[in-house]
Amino acid sequence: MSQQPRESIAALIGSLYQGSIDRREFMKRAGAAGLSAGLIGQVVATHVSAQDATPGTGPQTAMEIGVPGSVHNTDTAGGTIKIYSSWPLTGTYELIGGDAVQAVKMALADFGNAAGGFAIEYEALDDGSAANNGGPDSAKETENVNRVVADEDAMVYMATYNSGMAKISIPITNAVPMAQISYANTYPGLTKAIEGATEEGEPDIYFPSGKRNYMRVCPADDVQGGAQAKWAFNDQGKKKAYVLHDQSLYGQGVAAVFKIEFEKLGGEVLGFEGYDPKASDYQSLMTSIADKGPEIVTVGATVDNNAAKVLQDMRSVMDESVLFLGPDGLINEAFVQGAGDAAEGAYLTFAGYTPDKLVELGGAGADYVNRITEVLGHAPDSYAVYAYETTVVVIQSLDRVAAKDRSAILDDMIATEGFVSLLGKTWSFTETGDTDSAVIGLAKVIDGAITFQQSISS
């Protein structure tokens, strides 16, 4: 092979990793340049896996988000810092949790798998169980969090996905203290008290030391539930609602906020009820609801709690003139696929923007979606964008602290402000550990695809 083709191949590989050409274009041009099919396959496989030693695979994403002016240190002379995540990874959560893990890995690779003078080692723990069809398991979460706090190299716990699991782990990390940061918890009571929607003693019961150590990068359900109610009542003119929930901490919480706000606006709640997530069908439940004449049925639930069957049985007795409204626990492919044809026309809210909206907006958010879609082979779960942002919060804090010091890292992380988001917004953590972002998006299932419709709160 002559020298010129070798140089061309090197340039092509560089273009692939910089994102200026995609895999298909690389394969075509590398073949024309003389690279063997076997070597082309190896290069593509290495790129897709976003191997740990490769920094800068997404320069636009990495350079345009985070706290402006942050200085990134890729030196690793200080040794290794470990960060763990903990959320469900199998069953109904395979795509949800798996996409978030890939988002974390991509963020780490974008920053060279290093920060603050340390190499970063990441381990994704699963807090789900087969007995729950992959859904959260309190025993697994207890095992995970205790393993993490016992690891002297572990500085940050990125957990959890389900708010009910956060109730278990926050008091344990609080006693250390160790920073715990979630990309998806939305139950308000983890950080604040809301009359009628949170439990007695919350949130103080989760922070026995009296110091806050928990953060979340997504808006909580007091924002989402309120936005849902205003959209239903003001935008859609619906005056009669029936409110269901899956009896989980999250599901009941978001449903309660909807009920409170809908009634404040002047709407009538015909019923507020927890359904049995293990029931084989909901025909009789839906028949009784239909008899009451609702204009909208809202369901506070997560995908593992049989919400797809709830929608199927609702549609067997109520046509599309009765709206179905679900929260972010259902804005995923598993729910749409599970509900099948019944999902068509369903409305779903999300604390942020769906992937199709990020692409439309362009910039770093679109760059993130395009690159992770290439890795996954499908559009990412909507919440995975927050997994990427969570990782950047951690990386930049490690850069600023530049020491293996759990307490110092915690103090720095919770003081994060002016963070430029992939959503094109800027947010800061409040004193409660909440993001001050209030972006709520509304999506609709159209031709089997979750399709962004509008922002209903910002």
Image (cartoon, rainbow, N blue to C red):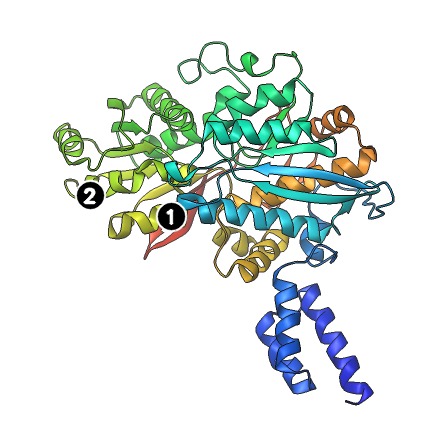
Residue at mark 2: 315
Q: SS of the residue at dot 1?
A: helix
- Name the residue: 19% across, 40% down: 313
User: Is 203 on the left-hand or right-hand side of 72?
Assistant: left
Number of numbered tags placed on the structure image: 2
User: Is 27 on the left-hand or right-hand side of 297?
Assistant: right
Residue 431 visible here? no
Quarter-wise, where is residue 288 in the image? top left
User: Is 362 on the left-hand or right-hand side of 83?
Assistant: left
- Name the residue: 47% across, 45% down: 96
Label 1 is placed on what type of residue? Ala
- Name the residue: 28% across, 39% down: 324
Task: Give how far across and how far down residue 104 sits, in percent.
Answer: 62, 46
Task: Give how far across and how far down residue 266 sits, in percent.
Answer: 30, 21
Residue at mark 1: 334
- Circle 2 Cα neighbour tier, 10 Å, few/some/many (<14 / 14–19 / ≥20): some
Residue furthest top in the image:
201
In this picture, is 228 found above or below 377?
A: above
Along the line of sight, which residue is nearer the eye, 405 or 59? 405
Along the line of sight, which residue is nearer the eye, 162 or 224? 162
In this picture, is 71 found above or below 198?
A: below
Task: Give how far across and how far down residue 355 sits, in percent.
Answer: 50, 51
Question: First in sequence: mark 1 or mark 2?
Answer: 2
- Name the residue: 67% across, 69% down: 16
